[in-house]
Image: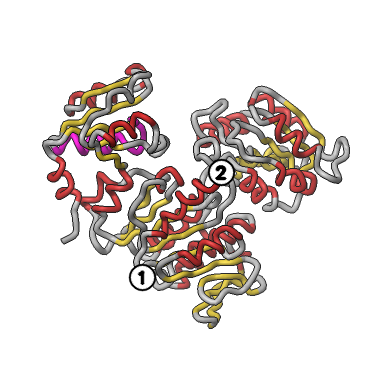
């Protein structure tokens, strides 16, 4: 008999539970546990002042709060739900587990109690757009879709209301996948490149975490891999279920690919044509790849005409090469999601013009060497800001073919000054794009806050 959310809540009633992190993913979890009559301690490094009315609300529901710098001390609860952003092997967790605590997460329990089919997406780039595309195609085809994971909202609290005919569509980060011991029915791996090396011990650990998206599948599972990415292509050989591939550069035996300008579905070498990729509304060849991955995931679920309708009408996801405005003939794009060099490179390749690029931010310890050649080829003015400005500058000027002034390089410590400098340097027909190649944590809470601030500045010009 399958485990339901109510079964799970009943099974832990009488146990003491700690929830680490009172953030987006864990606040609904805390409320659900409290309403089920479970003894909950909510722990967070922020002080009570940061939470305002939420702290009062959680206490009114019965939660005990443990806040401030000592929030991880003396953990001895029966079950500890960690926040995805906290490594599972830190000393307080290790010590608690040795003493008998069970360490888990909202996502791990969701996989155990979800009553419907799960499609999940991971990768270094393109996760959110691909996940959203799958969700949009399924909704347009008439399914009830629950979008969550690393985007949307946490879904565990809603699992009790889901029906077996629904579909859960998840974006999963490496941090959510690190300790996951279940895999989705359909797993999509967009690509793999160095990322989050400020938190992961090394690239090998990052890759191992990502592999959990398919490694626990059975023979009926479907795993979809990017054939054009060397690392994901090699991973496909370790998938225990059915393997599909997608490729922008070559034909595949099973999956999706381009045949000239046409998107085609391949089944045992047989070709089924869909439509010309130029009918996709959102720009960039990397978005063609996202569509190839999404189409492979919904084969057998979504009719061809619904796939085409989605391609022609879906406007894109906020902060992903998002057109903010056109002013005096200058187009301004918000690509704040580009928190790695590979993501920025994809953005640069989406335009025919040479761009005015605003880049720089928090240092995730990722090398910027790969950006040098791309900047020389696609950028005419480079505006650098943030903690990584020196590293990006060095990567560009040390690239073969660099000559002073090609591109022009402007450096501004203040983010707003950087945006204003880009605007002042732009003339009619130019494109200004915020595509930082870095995380936002040097000056912002997250990439969304950075993108919104960029839009505020641009809209006030």
Q: Where, quadrant-wise, is the N terminus in this rendering?
A: bottom left
N-term mark: 2 or 1: 2
Disc assigned to residue 219: 1
Give the x, y percent position of residue 186: 39, 63
Please report the bounds of the magenta region as a residue range: 21-36
Residue lying furthest right = 403
Q: Residue furthest front?
A: 98
User: Which residue is found at the position 41% from the left and 48% from the top?
Assistant: 177
Secondary element at image label 2: loop
Q: Is residue 326 visible?
A: yes
- Residue 311 seen by the camera: no
Task: Judge whether residue 3 is colored magenta.
Answer: no
Residue 209 coordinates in the image, percent (x, y): 45, 49
Separation of marks 2 and 1 at Cα, in angstroms: 30 Å
Q: Quadrant of residue 376?
A: top right
Judge from the rendering whether residue 424 lies leftward or rightward of residue 216; answer left or right.
right
How many other residues sit within 10 Å of disc 2, few (<14), some (14-19) or many (≥20)?
many
Residue 338 sits above or below residue 263 on the image: above
- Residue with the mark numbered 2: 195
**Of helix, strand and loop, which one carries label 1?**
loop
């Amino acid at each position: 008999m399958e485990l339901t959310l109510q079964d799970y809540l009943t099974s832990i009633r009488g146990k003491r539970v700690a929830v680490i992190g009172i953030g987006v993913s864990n606040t609904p979890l805390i409320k659900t546990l409290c309403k089920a009559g479970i003894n909950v301690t909510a722990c967070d490094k922020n002080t009570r002042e940061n939470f305002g009315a939420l702290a009062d609300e959680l206490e009114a529901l019965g939660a005990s709060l443990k806040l401030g710098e000592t929030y991880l001390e003396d953990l001895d609860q029966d079950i500890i739900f960690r926040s995805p952003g906290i490594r599972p092997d830190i000393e307080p967790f290790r010590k608690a587990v040795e003493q008998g605590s069970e360490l888990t997460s909202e996502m791990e329990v969701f996989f155990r109690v979800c009553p419907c089919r799960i499609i999940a997406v991971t990768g270094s780039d393109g996760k959110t757009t691909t996940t959203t595309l799958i969700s949009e195609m399924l909704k347009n085809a008439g399914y009830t879709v629950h979008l969550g994971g690393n985007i949307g909202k946490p879904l565990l609290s809603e699992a009790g209301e889901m029906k077996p005919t629904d579909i859960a569509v998840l974006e999963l980060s490496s941090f959510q996948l690190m300790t996951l011991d279940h895999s989705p029915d359909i797993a999509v791996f967009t690509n793999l490149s160095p990322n989050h090396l400020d938190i992961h011990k090394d690239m090998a650990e990052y890759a191992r975490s990502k592999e959990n998206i398919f490694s626990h599948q059975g023979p009926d599972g479907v795993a979809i891999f990017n054939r054009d990415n060397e690392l994901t292509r090699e991973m496909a050989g370790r998938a225990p279920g059915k393997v599909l591939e997608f490729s922008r550069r070559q034909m595949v035996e099973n999956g999706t690919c381009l045949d000239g300008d046409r998107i085609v579905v391949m089944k045992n070498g047989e070709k089924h044509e869909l439509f010309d990729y130029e009918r996709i509304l959102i720009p960039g060849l990397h978005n063609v790849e996202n569509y190839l991955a999404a189409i492979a995931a919904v084969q057998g679920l979504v009719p061809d005409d619904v796939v085409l309708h989605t391609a022609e009408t879906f406007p894109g996801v906020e902060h992903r090469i998002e057109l903010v405005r056109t002013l005096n003939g200058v187009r301004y794009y918000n690509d704040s999601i580009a928190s790695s060099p590979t993501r920025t490179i994809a953005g640069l390749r989406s335009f025919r013009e040479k761009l005015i690029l605003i880049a720089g931010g928090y240092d995730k310890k990722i090398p910027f060497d790969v950006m040098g050649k791309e900047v020389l080829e696609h950028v005419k003015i480079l505006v650098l800001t943030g903690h990584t400005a020196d590293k990006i500058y060095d990567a560009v000027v040390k690239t073969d073919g660099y000559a002073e002034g090609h591109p022009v390089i402007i450096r501004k410590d203040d983010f707003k000054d950087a945006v204003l400098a880009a605007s002042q340097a732009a003339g009619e027909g130019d494109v200004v794009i915020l595509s930082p190649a870095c995380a936002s944590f040097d000056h912002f809470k997250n990439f969304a806050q950075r993108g919104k601030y960029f839009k505020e500045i641009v809209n006030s010009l």
